[in-house]
Amino acid sequence: YFRELPLCEDRQYLLDLLDLNFPLETLCARVRSDAFWKRAFHHRWRTFVPIEVGSKPWIRIYLEQHLAELVEHLKPNEYDQESVKRIVELCSPFVRELRLERLQPSLSDNSDHVPLDAVLANLRRLQRISVTYDVKDVGHNFFLGCATITEMDVKLMTQGLERCGELTEFRLHSSKLEPTMMKRISAALGKGCPQLRTIAFPHCRCGDIGL
């Protein structure tokens, strides 16, 4: 019925009435209206101002923020790879950039964070990624090492990076990187990211060996 409406005004009127609480799967499959996705974004993130909007479609802006927020708040003990893969595959056609400003660490003896292998490996059109293995608002859950990147973190991240064939920019923030970690990252980027143009390690401790 919607496609049969001849006037853009009629279509926009229906989109203005469309419930924002419909399942995301349904909305992604059926709605491409920039006005609708902009409305959905500002309804959900009332105080958040997206950066570098430019000519990006709002469905992309919405799903990039949706995915980043989901990954940032995942707890390692609640991580289910199949559930994460389903969500990533839903977002994948639209996501070009992923900015992760925090990752939750495990509260067990090790400090491994939420694994990124399944996330990165299934973002087939990802071009830019920025990751911070840090936490915010730790409060009573603070422990030494909660903001430290681990060998397992790097191993799983690089397994995903090897599948990011369209990646042009990689940034890792505020981490203490051992020489073995640097070598693993370098090997993964060299193997799986032929389009890579920018590598940055702002505020990282990399030692004297480097890449």
Image: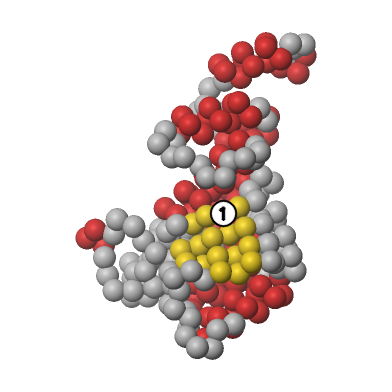
Query: Helix, strand, or loop for circle 1?
Result: strand
Residue 135 visible in the displayed image = yes
Image quadrant holding the C terminus, namely bottom right
Residue 180 seen from this side: no
Q: Is 94 placed above or below 121 here?
A: above
Please state if 207 lies on the left or on the right of 143 as rendered: right
Rendering quarter of residue 103: bottom left
Which residue is nearer to you in this view: 98 or 104? 98
Residue drawn at (28%, 59%) of the image: 138
Write the residue at 39% across / 64% down. Answer: 134
Question: Which residue does the image show at 46% across and 63% down from the upper left?
Answer: 132
Front-lying residue, 1 or 178: 178
Question: On the rendered image, what quadrant is the N terminus found in?
Answer: top right
Q: Which residue is mark 1?
A: 98
At label 1, which amino acid type do we have?
Leu
Residue 133, how many percent across, how many down? 44, 66
Residue at 45% from the left image edge and 74% from the top image edge:
204
Residue 123, above or below 20:
below
Label 1, residues with CA under 10 Å away: few <14, some 14-19, many ≥20: some
Q: Position of residue 27 (x, y in %)?
A: 62, 31
Examine the rendered structure and indicate whether residue 16 appears above or below residue 97. above
